[in-house]
Amino acid sequence: MGKIIKSVKLNILPLTSKKEQMLSELEKKWCDGINHLFETLDTWDVFNLPFTRYNLQNLEYNHIRKRFNMHSQHAVDMMKDAFTVWQNNGRNGINDAPVSFNIPRSGSFKETKHGNPVVSVSTLNGRTGLPVAQDGAWNRFQSFLKNGWNTTMFRIKRNGNNWQVLVSIFKNFSIKGDYDTVIGIDTGSRTLATISIINRERKTLKQIYMGRDIWNKQRDFSIRRSKLQRIRDTAKGDNRFKAIRKLNRLKGYESCFVKTRIYEIANRIIDLAREYNGFIAIEDLKGLKESKMHRKSNRRVKRMPFYKFRVALEQIAGQNNTLVVAINPRHTSQRCSRCGIIRKTNNVVFSCPSCGFECNRDRNASVNIAHVAGNEFFKNKRLISVQKPQISMGDAPVNGHGWKNEKVLSSCLQHAQSSDFKPMALAIGS
């Protein structure tokens, strides 16, 4: 069984001056409270207590409620957000942040007597109802609920002069357990996904390269960005402002292109999994972007969207009842997929000094990934389920990036672990 999380954005209609003031005051108190908790966490050593969220809550709960006049559930959610962000090094002060609401304690969805939807939220001065725009986003949200998705929390966030509701919805999906093949995926910078399909007899049925155009597009975007940045830093007047506007648009173009291609590739891989009755094996590259490398390699790794690709693959696979396993990437690119000898190489072509086998390094790695996952699954079927949550202080909890026109939140300002909304991923056991 796996859990998929999405965050759906709903639009709030223009508010009265009184309701606008109530939300603004709540937002300010929320930010002040989180900054106060950051100060407490920064001097935690003086309390001589274990560093846990439980101890933080015991220490600050009554003080937060009294000083900032917070609803009890707001105080709990505030401490949870501050603690998880602090654990993930998000220790700078904040001026704006989405306010969390727990259903039904501090917030809920209701209807007026005329049947119009509203979001009922607790503020510093009692409850108030915020009118929801009955547009395409609302209709999609209703269709999710009719299809079995559930929600227990949402966040309210300022968007310019308006407000938005970020609703976290989740649904459990059953995962099939009987497969004939394994699809090994090696994720790289120049080729996003190198795919090898291996059957139970370790025979390679098909090998495919996907996502080479992503690197080429990112390179073109990078060149264009550098030129615009030079204009922005040297020009004056209208030319400088034009360069700034073009830089903002360029960022949007690149983000939309990469997300679209990632989802196209993920859907194609799921089609292959259905066609060959296979499960998917991918490397667990957690922590790769924090590794220290020389300048050129570091730039390539930072540009590689492997994490977005993985969560997109897990999201679509869960909705299609397909298993995704994450394996240790150790020696997958250095081990010969034919004889098993390990040879370090920086060349594009892997050449085995023992058996003479030669092939593309990424193809060799994808076969090794499939072999490791296949040996574990087909022989022992010993899989350990692990939780891989995300939460964003800038947006709502999610575990996958969605289509932009689906109104699914995809940008996360600060990823952090949370006790809420723990989506299921699967990893090979040791």
Image: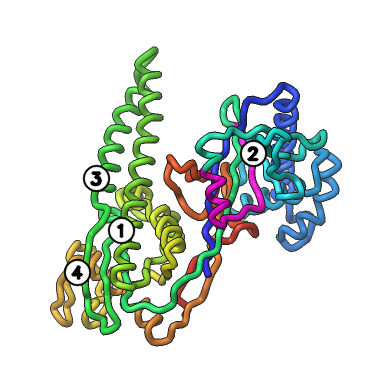
Closer to the camera: disc 4 or disc 1?
A: 1
1 and 2 marks in contact (CB < 8 Å):
no
In space, the residues marked 2 and 3 are separated at their CA atoms by 38 Å
Give the class, few, some or many, for how many residues have Cα within 10 Å of label 4's Cα (few <14, many ≥20). Answer: many
Residue at numbered disc 1: 268
4 and 1 marks in contact (CB < 8 Å):
no
Q: In the picture provided, is 4 more to the left or to the right than 348?
A: right
Q: Which residues are magenta?
A: 140-158
Residue at numbered disc 3: 216
In space, the residues marked 2 and 4 are separated at their CA atoms by 52 Å
2 and 4 marks in contact (CB < 8 Å):
no
Tell me the kind of residue under disc 4: Phe
Q: In the picture provided, is 107 more to the left or to the right than 266?
A: right
Tell me the kind of residue under disc 3: Asn
Whichever of labels 2 and 4 marks the residue nearer the N terminus, that label is 2
Residue 350 bears which disc, if any?
Answer: 4
Q: Of helix, strand and loop, which one carries label 3?
A: helix
Tell me the kind of residue under disc 2: Ile
Whichever of labels 1 and 3 marks the residue nearer the N terminus, that label is 3
Residue 91 x, y percent position in the rendering: 62, 45
Whichever of labels 2 and 3 marks the residue nearer the N terminus, that label is 2
Tell me the kind of residue under disc 1: Arg
Query: Residue at 76% of width from left, 40% of height from top?
Result: 122
Closer to the camera: disc 1 or disc 2?
A: 1
Q: Of helix, strand and loop, which one carries label 2?
A: strand
In space, the residues marked 1 and 2 are separated at their CA atoms by 35 Å
Whichever of labels 1 and 2 marks the residue nearer the N terminus, that label is 2
Residue at numbered disc 2: 156
Query: Residue at 52% of width from left, 66% of height from top?
Result: 2
